[in-house]
Amino acid sequence: MQFSADQVKGASVDSAGVIGLMGAVIGGVTVLGGNWLTQRGERRRAYEDRVWALNAQTYVETYRWSLVANAQVSTMRARLGGQKHTVLARLPDSPALDVGVEANLAVFGAESVFETYTAANQLRLRILMLVQESTQAEAESELDPRQMCDECLVQLGKLRNAISRESRGG
């Protein structure tokens, strides 16, 4: 279909109407785009807040565990050293960190904190096994339990320092 010159002249377009329509479209797109960006930013901040809260809870539980483990190892070290007294801990017995907390530490915690926790816990468990064994098995062991206790106490101190450093954003 072809239009003649007379038909084209008669179909004039109101330029004010087109400009108004274009302004409304641009305004609508801008509002929608701004809304989308705002929601995206809010979702990201909400996610970061949840991760931070989980991290904080995990670090508090791990720090608490390290205090209990420190008291346990200090008590074992005192017993192995031939001292008659035991270190009194006003903390509940906590032989292991809760599996869920340990998983959160592995997934969300800093690598240095998790590695230090793992090293300290492995030493602590080896000490517990040695202390529960008979004195003959202890005498035959190549490992000096007192040195293991000392090393475990050092690792527990490193763990608390790593948690403090990470929780302060350092």
Image: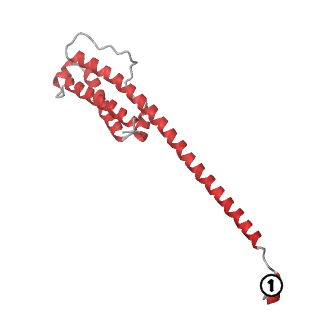
Element class at badge 1: helix
Horizontally, residue 142 falls left or right of residue 19, namely left
Give the image location of residue 6, x and y in percent.
82, 88
Give the image location of residue 5, x and y in percent.
79, 89
Q: Which residue is mark 1?
A: 9
Farthest residue to the top: give it.
84
Q: Residue at x 62, y 57 (%)?
A: 33
Tell me: residue 46, above or below residue 27: above
Quadrant occupied by the N terminus: bottom right
In this view of the protein, which residue sits in the foreground, 6 or 115? 6
Q: Is residue 124 visible?
A: yes
Q: Is residue 100 visible?
A: no
Quadrant occupied by the C terminus: top left
Q: Residue at x 19, y 28 (%)?
A: 143
Give the image location of residue 148, x and y in percent.
22, 27
Tell me: residue 74, above or below residue 27: above
Q: Quadrant of residue 2?
A: bottom right
Q: Quadrant of residue 164?
A: top left
Tell me: residue 56, above or below residue 36: above
In this view of the protein, which residue sits in the foreground, 65 or 36? 36
Tell me: residue 99, above or below residue 137: below
In this view of the protein, which residue sits in the foreground, 13 or 96? 13
Horizontally, residue 129 falls left or right of residue 42, namely left
Give the image location of residue 59, x and y in percent.
41, 32
Farthest residue to the front: give it.
16
Amino acid carrying label 1: it is Lys
